Image (tube, rainbow, N blue to C red):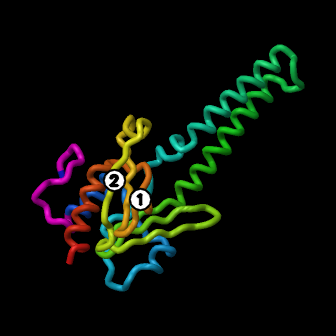
Amino acid sequence: MTSGGAIEPDAPAAPRAAQAAPAAVGAVETLPHLLQATLGPDEVVILLLRPSLLYIPLSSLGTLVASVLIGTALLYAARFQWSPWTEGDAVLIGGGLAALRLAWAAVDWWFHLYALTDRRILARYGVFRTQLYEAPLSRIQNTILVQRLRERLFGLGTLGFSTAGRGTFDAFWEMLRAPYAVHRTVLDAIERYGRR
């Protein structure tokens, strides 16, 4: 792997995948029980990822902006004695709403987990209702790499997968670091393991 995070073009697919994991998101060291139970005895995990930690503030932007606006409105009302709130109450309410949203986003981040094995793609997410998406590599028809403005500013990207017979993308790996390296690793795995 080069210092810029790009994968060397002549590296074989399996070592290339191993190289991409730490650079891409920071591989998760232990396989959670929920995913471990779905793997076959000889199934090899190539990538194990979570969204970037920036997922926490970036997924909360709307609520954070609303919290600032609510806090500012309450502060303004308190200054002119239009409400029973004090200025301290206004700051506490606005800050409390922002803190609650960030705490929820952190829990949500923890439950996002993505895996690429030599047989399939997996995506697990959901706090109260856990969802586990899995598709064999041989069924992956298309992939898409999307970078919304807020992701592009921080070098992040979202990778989507569609399976044969579907007109839409079935699952997404959200806000990945080094998204092009991860995408290349996924394409290499599909080519190597999914076409045989």
Please determine whether, in this image, residue 50 is positioned above or below residue 32.
above
Does residue 144 appear left or right of residue 5 in this picture? right
Does residue 107 appear left or right of residue 156 in this picture? right
Give the alpha-carbon distance from disc 1 to disc 2, as whole Å: 8 Å
Which is more N-terminal, label 2 or label 1? 2
Does the CB distance between marks 1 and 2 fall below 8 Å?
yes
Q: Amino acid at mark 1?
A: Phe
Q: Quadrant of residue 193?
A: bottom left
Q: Which secondary structure type mostly characterizes the magenta part of the structure?
A: loop
Please determine whether, in this image, residue 3 is positioned above or below residue 7.
above
Residue at 76% x, 18% y is 76
Q: Residues within 10 Å of mark 1 (few under 14, many from 20)?
A: some
| Image disc number at residue 144 | 2
Is 126 included in the stretch rendered in magenta? no
Q: Amino acid at mark 2?
A: Ile
Residue at 32% x, 67% y is 140
| Dot 2: element | strand
Residue at 74% x, 23% y is 73
Q: Residues within 10 Å of mark 2 (few under 14, many from 20)?
A: few
Q: Which residue is mark 1?
A: 169
Residue farthest to the top, as pictured: 80
Please determine whether, in this image, residue 189 is positioned above or below residue 62.
below
Part of the protein shown in magenta: 2-15
Q: Could you say which is closer to the camera, residue 67 or residue 145? A: 145
Residue at 50% x, 59% y is 112
Percent across and percent down for residue 175 are 42, 49
